[in-house]
Image (cartoon, helix red, strand yellow):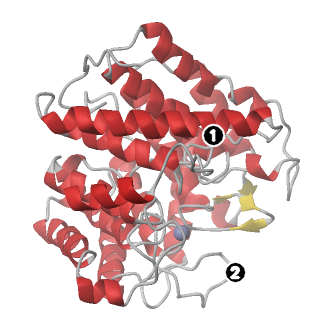
Amino acid sequence: MSHAWEQILRQTDPQKEKDYTIYTGSAGIGYLALHSALLVESADPRRRHFVDIARNYLRGAQATLEGRLRQGRHEDISFILGTPGVYAPLAVLRRLQGKSNDAVEACIQRVLDLAPLFLNQTHHHPRRQHPHYEFEILYGESGYLTSLLYLNSNFPGRIPDQLLSEVTDHIISGAEEGPGGALLWAWHGKEYLGAAHGVSGILLALLDVHLQGLRLPDVVLERIQCTVNYLYSLRLPSGNYPTRPSKECDDRLVQWCHGAPGILLLFVKAYEVFGQPKYLAWAELAADVVWMRGLLRKGNGLCHGVAGNAYCFLAVFRCTDNDIYLHRARVFALAAQDDIVAAHQDTPDHSMSLFEGLGGLLALYADLLEGDPRQARFPAFETRGVRSGTGTSHKEESYGDGKA
Ligand SMILES: [Zn+2]
């Protein structure tokens, strides 16, 4: 693990990096370091090391982001590809460093101030005024919702219910009517099913709102169940899922962004909310497909890489307690570092990043080796509930640092 960290630190530079995002930029490495810091004991010297890395990368991301905005670039609203991906982790880091409440609050407020950008927009179908303010996780409103949920799970009660409610309502009111009353959203004029651009990612965020204690209206929960059932009805003979409703024969992609893995995560979430055994059974069927189709050749990241698919096994593991899924996650994690496997993989464009590269694998290692794998969540996508007292699995809440 330390060798992989050395590789990342050697090959990336937060002061020069132009990509500030969680997806492939400095905020992703900062998020990873913060995640790692929170998983080790407070007395462990690695915590200070990880906090230092998180600070360097998040502050580098912040400088790049603010520089872009000063040049007139528009503000992106999602957690993974926008401003919240810098400021929400920075709020958690500042608290860990023992910074003042004002310093923490400034970061939280920076995220909250983004809401009017899209809440004040009316919907224009099939394409809206601003393509970045559509609904999907990677760029859209559900991606903003993820950042609110991340903050709410780290600072329980801090995010006003009213704001969560308004954002949730806005997303639902932008849905189109699908077969059997299913909710569908268009991205760039087309409907997608997977986690990154499609309905499964959006529904997962909505269900996480419910799991965090803001009960969704029964009528919305019914529509979500209709949609989950509809998704299952699109299952291909292989057990995989197509990228779009109209692409019945599209059986190529088995990765978080498109195909069974992202939809599996939604099935698990539906099981956690509705408690119906069929959803868990569907998740297990999808997990078999992810396992049988094997290792991805596109690197080790989260979006379309080995680590992302391994997190799907951990999601099923936490609901079934069946060790086979933990075993599968470990096999993927180990195989990803095998020289023979590496020789058959392509090198992603951002080979050190969280969502495309080695960073994703390091997040997986941290969850497998330092944390409780049952508590693991797909990074920057799934959040933990706050009602059950599992708002954080962090081993200490504060860490006096003293440095700027
Ligand atoms: Zn992808």
Q: Nearer the viewer, residue 336 or 156?
A: 336
Above or below residue 384? Residue 106 is above
* Front residue of this view, candidates 33 and 241: 33
Q: Is residue 91 above or below residue 320?
A: above
How much space separates mark 1 and mark 2, taking CA atoms?
A: 40 Å
Q: Which residue is at 70% across, 64% downward?
A: 178
The yes-or-no answer for disc 2 within 8 Å of ligand 1 is: no
Residue 1 seen from this side? no
Point out residue 8 in the picture as x, y percentages from the top left corner: 37, 57
One can see residue 5 in this view: yes
> Given the image, on which type of amino acid does mark 2 rest?
Ser
Pointer 1 residue: 64
Q: Position of residue 60 (x, y in %)?
A: 53, 38
Nearer to us of marks 1 and 2 is 1
Circle 2: element type: loop
The local crowd at label 1, few if under 14, some if 14 to 19, many if 20 or more residues have their Cα within 10 Å, is many
Question: Badge 2 is on which residue?
Answer: 246
Query: At 65% from the left edge and 68% from the top edge, which residue is drawn?
Result: 192
Quadrant including the C terminus: top left
Give the answer, above or below, for where 256 lies relative to 209.
below
Q: Quadrant of the N terminus?
A: bottom left
* Residue 351 horizontal side relative to residue 227, left or right: left
Q: Is residue 269 above or below residue 283?
A: above
Label 2, residues with CA under 10 Å away: few <14, some 14-19, many ≥20: few
Q: Quadrant of residue 365?
A: bottom left
On the picture, is 89 further left or further right than 257?
A: left
